[in-house]
Amino acid sequence: MSGESGSSGYVRRDGRRPDELRPFSIRTGVFRNADGSAEIKLGGNWIVVAVYGPREHFPKSQLSQDKAILNCRYHMAPYSTSERKSPKPSRREIELSKVIKTALERAILLDQYPEMCIDVYIEVLQAAGSTRVASITAASVALADAGIPMRDMVVGCSVGKVDGQIVLDISEEEDKEGEADLPIAIMPNLRKIVLLQMDGKMTHDEIKRAFELALKGAMQLHEEQIRALMRRIEEMGELKR
Amino acid sequence: MSGSERKIVFPGEQIRGYGSYAPGEGVIKQGDKLTSCLFGILSVSRREVSVIPYKEVYRPKKGDVVVGVVVGYGNSGWFVDIGSYTKAFLHVSEVIKGRFDSRNVELSDHLKIGDVIIAKVTDVPRIGYFQITIKGKDLGKVTGDAYFIKVNPVKLRRIIGRRGSMINLIKDHIGGEIILGKNGVIVYKDGYESFQKLKNIINLISEKTFASGLTAHVAELLSKGSGRDERGKRQ
């Protein structure tokens, strides 16, 4: 597969074009008991998010006087990976919880709820690469579903370099074998970046191209976010006789 | 808010065409642009644009009549859960006349944990507990047989209907005393059977909030139901 020049003819391991997302769908209102919830399926990824709040923060000694605190937990189920994962929060999960928290914090109007907290529980039921950005995309929908005020939605998308090609929405296999991956999350209306990480090496020019590709992918996912919320309204408008 | 021109907005969506309007609830100004910060329906009044959220955690306003449950005792009053993001505090002076001496007055002699009260919000501080009172007409402890339904507070608008059309319809058909708390708690005082009927209707309204012709549909259901009742009584 190597040696081919020109990205247009390049076919990826799973048969996708370089600029193609895996099949995706987002659904809201998956949990009855949470204040807001969402589910995302992106290729083999299957992630559910539940949101609680705003509610009183405990312990009182750790609350913030001028804004709400966002608690975020990213957790992978033991059966989410090919080899059983210990349910104990790993180093990686703690890092991703923090990274997702900072990304969502930019969007939520936390100053409207001083001394409160908002909880976001992300449960990865099945992982197949790019879970952090998929989690952010779903979490944002769950927050909107819960009626929590936000500056903008947040949507994430990943790009990477595999076999010398810049590809969109990298899968687990591409992540392991590729040269670089770059997850980004943006606020699509405000055109602001809230998450930007990179593993591996890319040239200046490649990053630029990767970035543009990621933005395109993110906008597609953003449309699905809107559709998912819209479906919720439509459900409330149908009378069954 | 007429039925035909509902506009659904999403967080971050720019609201165009209302340049000189003030941002109301659910709308923020980013730069010089009005932006929605909630997922819901756009509502425009004379000077203000706001968003009616699709779902929310109750945010009390001064003067709201709410239904709450006593959940704890403080040094000088009761903590009341009004289903919001923090508790409300009912000061003892709102309940007991004259001087209060904690050495010879037991708070639980007046209101116990688990008691349900109808209260009015008197203050909503930025931080700390909401202040409520039970002084006033139709306020105070709920006594006798009563049933409760909890709905999301944004649904109340639909349950009441335009100029009270929906709630009057329900009251006419079901009877009994119905009290709507602004926090989404509905108190019903009458028999259990009619409560079940009310509950079904309320659940239908909160599930199908945006359906057009909902009032007519409810009217149909109600008249069917009451017809059955009358037949039952005759036998």
Image: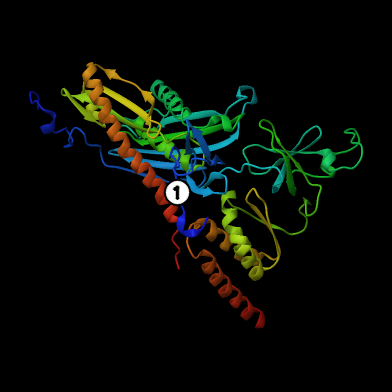
Residue located 54% across and 72% down the image = B220
> How many neighbours does mark 1 have within 10 angstroms: few (below 14), some (14-19), or many (20 or more)?
some
* Chain of the residue under the numbered disc 1 shown in the image: B
Compared with B76, B83 (above or below) is below
User: Which amino acid type is shown beneath numbered disc 1?
Assistant: Ile
B51 vs A213, nearest the viewer: B51
Q: Quadrant location of residue A99?
A: top left
Looking at the image, residue B3 sits to the left or right of residue B46; the answer is left
A49 vs A185, nearest the viewer: A185
Looking at the image, residue B139 sits to the left or right of residue B192; the answer is right
| Residue B4, x across and y down, in percent | 46, 59
Compared with B85, B142 (above or below) is below
Q: Mark 1 points at which residue?
A: B8
Compared with A111, B56 (above or below) is below
- Residue found at the far bottom of this picture: B235
The answer to whether residue A70 shows anywhere in this view is yes
- Circle 1 SS class: strand
A183 vs A149, nearest the viewer: A149
| Residue B62, x across and y down, in percent | 70, 42
- Quarter of the C terminus of chain B within the rendering: bottom right
| Residue A91, x across and y down, in percent | 40, 20
Looking at the image, residue A232 sits to the left or right of residue A119; the answer is left
Residue located 25% across and 21% down the image = A207
- Residue found at the far left of this picture: A3
